[in-house]
Image: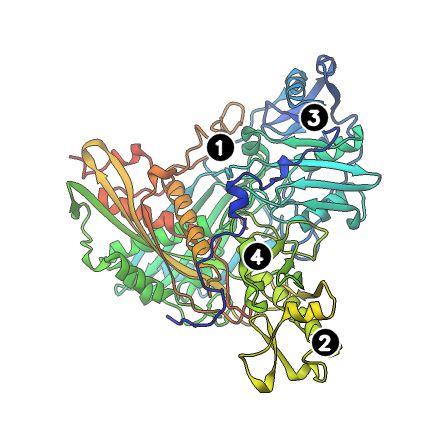
Amino acid sequence: MPQETTASPIGRDTPRVDGPLKVSGTAQYASDFHFPGLLYGVPVEATIANGKITKLDAVAAEKIPGVRTILHRQNIGKIFRSVLGKGIEGICIERRPPFEDDVIRYYGQYVALAVADTFESAKAAADAVVVSYAKEKPNVEDKLTADDDPDEVMTSYGPAKRRQSERGDAAGAFASAPVKVDQTYVTPAETHVPIELQGTTAMWDGDKLTIYEESQAVFNMRGVLAQMFGLPEENVRVITKFVGSGFGSKLWPWTHCPLAVAAARQVGKPVKLVLSRKMTFQTAGHRARTQQRIRLGATPEGKLVSLEHDYICHRSILEEYHENCGEATAFHYSVPNLRVHFGWARRNIGTPSDMRGPGAVPGLYATESAMNELADQLKMDPVQLRILNEPKIDEGEGIPFSSRHYVECLQLGAEKFGWSRRNAEVGAMKRDGLTLGWGVAGAAWIATRDSAAANVELRDDSSARVACGVQDIGTGTYTVLALLTADKTGVPVEKVEVVLGDTELPFGPVSGGSWATASVVPAVFAAADNAISSLLQVATTTPGSPFEKRKPDDLAFQNGRVFVKADGLGGGVPFADLLKRANLRLVSGSGRSEGIVASKEKPKFSMHSFGCHFAEVTWQPEIARLRVNRVVSVIDAGRIINPLAGRNQIEGAVVMGIGMALFEHTTYDPQNGAPINSNLADYIVAVNSDVPKLEVHFLDYPDLKLNAVGARGIGEIGLAGIAAAITAAVYHATGVRVRELPVRIEDLLKSSVLT
Ligand code: MOS
């Protein structure tokens, strides 16, 4: 593995620079901010999932002490629709402004908003609003059949062809293939449950709007709210200093944001609206349910000849969020004949949205599960099957990969896991009276960059400051910005002040798609270079400076010191001394970089991260007890800027993957359409006691086609593939092939290995 030895802090384990603020309770999250005269808003939730409001009676609610107003369709005032902009702009998954009509399309849709002096009064008032409905039976059916949509559909992100990718003759090659797998895999609706709830605090100053919001994308939110309230963008400020995780649920504005803003406009005071956990299940997105038919055709030697991926995902009645399960299918393996096609099924549910590894995570669960089934059918090692089908280029796009080391991931993972000791026979491996199951699966996730801007200052107290309007959603962006600035300026990480999460700062990218880090690298580097140029200018123009007679071109800057190039590194003068001599508090530089994520040009390289997981489960047939006992993950995500936080990201994703494989599913009540397990007691996620020792390895090959550091992203890749590795291990231990997540005890009771 390539390793550089430099004085740079990049690549060294660095504890979070914002950690002390968080553990001491001094970090202020969006809803921790209080303002004089602050009022509280509590929405009224529809108790049906399909129908119409026939009457809304707020008389009793208005009489509750402390109530300022009850807002509903008649009195909320104008809220405009927003439209998609160019690239990552104007994105809003639920486009319908709240209260736009009297139609109820999903359970929990907001129908009114109580605003009061205290949260308690507002809640009592919301509960006292009496709403009558003309009710119809909701469609929350689990079984998905594709609606009659056109071949090209409009999605939340723009137009998409339902036939996503095609080469050769997939159906013909499948028909004549000597070995076939034809199975359907189902993933349930899953809901993001970040511990910090969603909420907005909105306040107006004349025609200027400020909101505190736990946003993964403050600039997008600014743009959408400006449209919704008919304001110029510069009149809207969005602030997000800390985020208690998002997993995608906080990427785009939800309907509570304009509600809080409209309420603050109406009452002329700041209004805080924080969702309940139940509301977040209803109106703040979830991962769509998917049903994916995979057909694999292969030769007896295991060479793929055909791959068909036909999937259906659910969507809401009005919105067009698409769970792009085919994201990785066209390039992950070499196969001459391929077809990826999707359909949608409308349901009376709040719209699905992005959730960690959107598309690729459920997609790879299906395709990697099918690969494992093919390996079993061929009696072939699933690692070897994958290596045998390694592509030379991205066969979907017909372009080379920027950097792909998937085979090395599999080989290193096999070695670290001890895969060579595998006995492939079901139920054959035992340890300490437990049956062991082993499984493997591959992972992939996009690597890209959004545009970004940054400002870097070098200051006379030897410190530096870096500012960028990106967010830290708990993933370590504060620390990444400090590390990048430290790398360029030689200022120690602890002396770099990091400012982010505010639309008053230079433009920052979305904290999503695992592209925040890759995006900020060029902007911060350019800003630091410009600050250094200013410093060299100062050094050569300050009377009495040791470099007074020199030209800036004669000088160089490294490790925080300015020196004469010809003299070489070693001597030189610290930048703070030069600033003091010039009586300057600071020099600063700005930098900007263009993104590639929204580029219309055909890319020259296919950029992705890769990885794999090896999972071990233990199975106690006597009591039908299944545990995930060990996971080894190998990730090829370019250069890792902070391995400590990087491992933490992968471990967190594996924990989420254990939840995906074994626990998580949102259940809709067929009677009233409500997500019924809408709380942390009934929506089961993996907790400490479910999580074994996790081993994470990074390959650390810089992807210099993406940015100067070669860093890709690591937020999402760790969740890809893990469920397929676990279900393969479950099969190996129990003989039960589970193709609908999560794996349930009821499924395992069918095990022939039960004795
Ligand atoms: Mo991620 S679903 O892009 O926050």
Q: Nearer the viewer, residue 396 or 166?
A: 396
Nearer the observer: mark 1 or 3; the answer is 3
Q: What residue did someone put label 4 on? A: 516
Q: What residue appears at the point 24 percent right and 33 percent down from the top-left corner?
A: 624
Q: Are marks 4 and 3 in contact (CB under 8 Å)?
A: no
**Outermost residue toward the front?**
544
Element type at mark 2: helix
Q: Are marks 1 and 3 in contact (CB under 8 Å)?
A: no
Q: Which mark sits nearer the N-terminus, 1 or 3?
A: 3
Element type at mark 1: loop
Nearer the observer: mark 4 or 3; the answer is 4
Q: Which mark sits nearer the N-terminus, 2 or 3?
A: 3
Q: Are marks 2 and 3 in contact (CB under 8 Å)?
A: no
Element type at mark 4: helix
User: Residue 237 at what x, y percent from top left?
Assistant: 73, 46
Name the amino acid, label 4. Answer: Ala
Nearer the observer: mark 2 or 1; the answer is 2
User: Residue 592 at what x, y percent from top left?
Assistant: 67, 65
User: Residue 755 at what x, y percent from top left?
Assistant: 15, 34
Mark 1 and ligand 1: say if the CB distance to the nearest ligand atom is below 8 Å: no
Q: Nearer the viewer, residue 367 or 535?
A: 535
Residue 560, labelled with which disc?
none
